[in-house]
């Protein structure tokens, strides 16, 4: 009698355990990482004193967008970049739109974008020595391609401060990483990871508990 009860318990435990393992692997393979975005180049010719073209409304920048996922493609909606005159986003300098595109797994893309700058705002943003700090915010939506299907659309909002020299060019050769404006998302991922770990650990505990309950009778 006790034997048959133990057998059912062991079977149930195995089922729960393999379900838990399956969902863990499902979660691992469906998990997606957001694209990494950076500003590689940034140029406002109106600030170049050598050129002496204060009315030039050109706003040129180069974005780098990378797909860090090993086996998932990313479909980007149009990428909307907004440039502000200061880190506190007082006034809009201009907008740059990069058309929608698809990016395969582990790929990098450099995208040149051009927009129209408000020269009044631009010229006011720089200090006496000609340098200035602009705010660059990027927003878009992405869908991840897993095998043959796409995930739901997900919003991406990132940004960073970009310092320009007296020539109106971004300081430094290295790209500037655009950081998430929504820190809640990464928090959510940490909580999800902890929950999954908790589930696995409690399943393991449950199994060792029911095996111990069988008084050393281990099936198969
Ligand atoms: C820029 O525009 C302002 C006002 O439209 C004008 O007064 C000025 O002469 C222009 N400057 C140059 C260098 O074209
Ligand atoms: C700005 O970008 C446009 C389009 O990519 C290009 O034709 C133009 O030469 C660039 N201007 C400057 C000043 O770099
Ligand atoms: C781009 O973003 C700015 C600021 O959020 C917004 O005002 C503008 O309408 C957006 N442009 C497009 C084409 O979505
Ligand atoms: C934003 O920063 C600029 C200087 O960077 C300052 O002059 C302005 O008052 C600030 N605006 C707000 C609303 O804090
Ligand atoms: C430039 O920005 C100023 C201040 O925000 C605004 O009054 C002006 O209308 C803008 N000019 C253009 C051409 O959008
Ligand atoms: C230019 O002026 C700003 C603010 O006044 C200062 O922070 C910066 O160090 C100066 N840069 C140079 C190259 O002098
Ligand atoms: C400003 O324009 C001049 C003339 O085109 C160019 O040689 C110089 O490199 C520019 N300055 C910067 C900092 O790009």
Image (cartoon, rainbow, N blue to C red):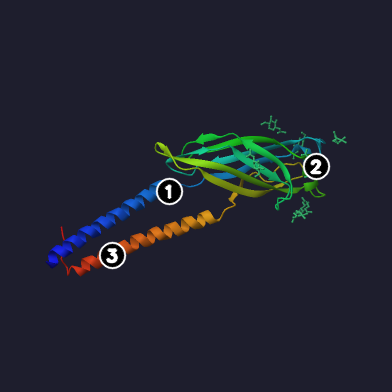
Q: Is mark 3 within 8 Å of ligand 3?
A: no
Determine whether, in the image, residue 30 is placed left or right of residue 11: right
The residue at the point 50 percent across, 42 percent down is 153
Whether residue 210 is visible = yes
Q: CA distance from mark 3 to mark 1?
A: 27 Å
Q: Secondary structure at mark 2?
A: helix
Count residues near mark 2 (Cα–Cα under 10 Å), then give few for <14, some for 14-19, many for 20+.
few
Give the quadrant of the N terminus: bottom left
In the picture of the structure, the residue carrying the numbered disc 3 is 206
Count residues near mark 3 (Cα–Cα under 10 Å), then give few for <14, some for 14-19, many for 20+.
some
Determine whether, in the image, residue 160 is placed left or right of residue 2: right
In the picture of the structure, the residue carrying the numbered disc 1 is 31
The residue at the point 28 percent across, 65 percent down is 206
Give the quadrant of the C terminus: bottom left
Q: Which mark is residue 120?
A: 2
Q: Is mark 2 within 8 Å of ligand 5?
A: yes
Residue 184 coordinates in the image, percent (x, y): 54, 56
Residue 5 coordinates in the image, percent (x, y): 16, 64
The residue at the point 35 percent across, 50 percent down is 25
Which of the two labelled residues, at mark 3 and mark 1, occupies the earlier sequence position?
A: 1
Determine whether, in the image, residue 184 is placed left or right of residue 217: right
Q: CA distance from mark 2 to mark 1?
A: 46 Å
Q: CA distance from mark 2 to mark 3?
A: 68 Å
Count residues near mark 1 (Cα–Cα under 10 Å), then give few for <14, some for 14-19, many for 20+.
few
């Amino acid at each position: 009698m006790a034997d048959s009860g133990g057998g059912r318990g062991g079977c149930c435990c195995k089922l729960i355990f393999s379900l838990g393992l399956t969902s863990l692997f499902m979660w691992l393979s469906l998990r997606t990482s957001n694209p990494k975005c950076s500003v590689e180049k940034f140029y406002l010719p109106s600030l170049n004193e050598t050129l002496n073209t204060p009315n030039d409304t050109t706003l040129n920048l180069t974005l780098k967008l990378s797909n860090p996922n090993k086996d998932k493609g990313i479909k980007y909606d149009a990428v909307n970049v907004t440039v502000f005159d200061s880190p506190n986003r007082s006034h809009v300098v201009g907008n740059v739109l990069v058309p929608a595109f698809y990016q395969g797994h582990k790929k990098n893309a450099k995208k040149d974008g051009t927009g129209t700058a408000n020269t009044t705002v631009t010229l006011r943003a720089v200090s006496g020595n000609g340098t200035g700090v602009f705010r660059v915010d990027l927003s878009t939506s992405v869908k991840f391609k897993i095998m043959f299907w796409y995930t739901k659309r997900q919003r991406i909002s990132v940004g960073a401060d970009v310092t320009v020299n007296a020539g109106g060019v971004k300081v430094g050769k290295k790209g500037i990483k655009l950081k998430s404006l929504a820190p809640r998302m990464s928090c959510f991922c940490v909580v999800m990871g902890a929950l999954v770990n908790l589930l696995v650990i409690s399943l393991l505990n449950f199994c060792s508990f029911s095996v111990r309950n069988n008084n050393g009778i281990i099936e198969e």
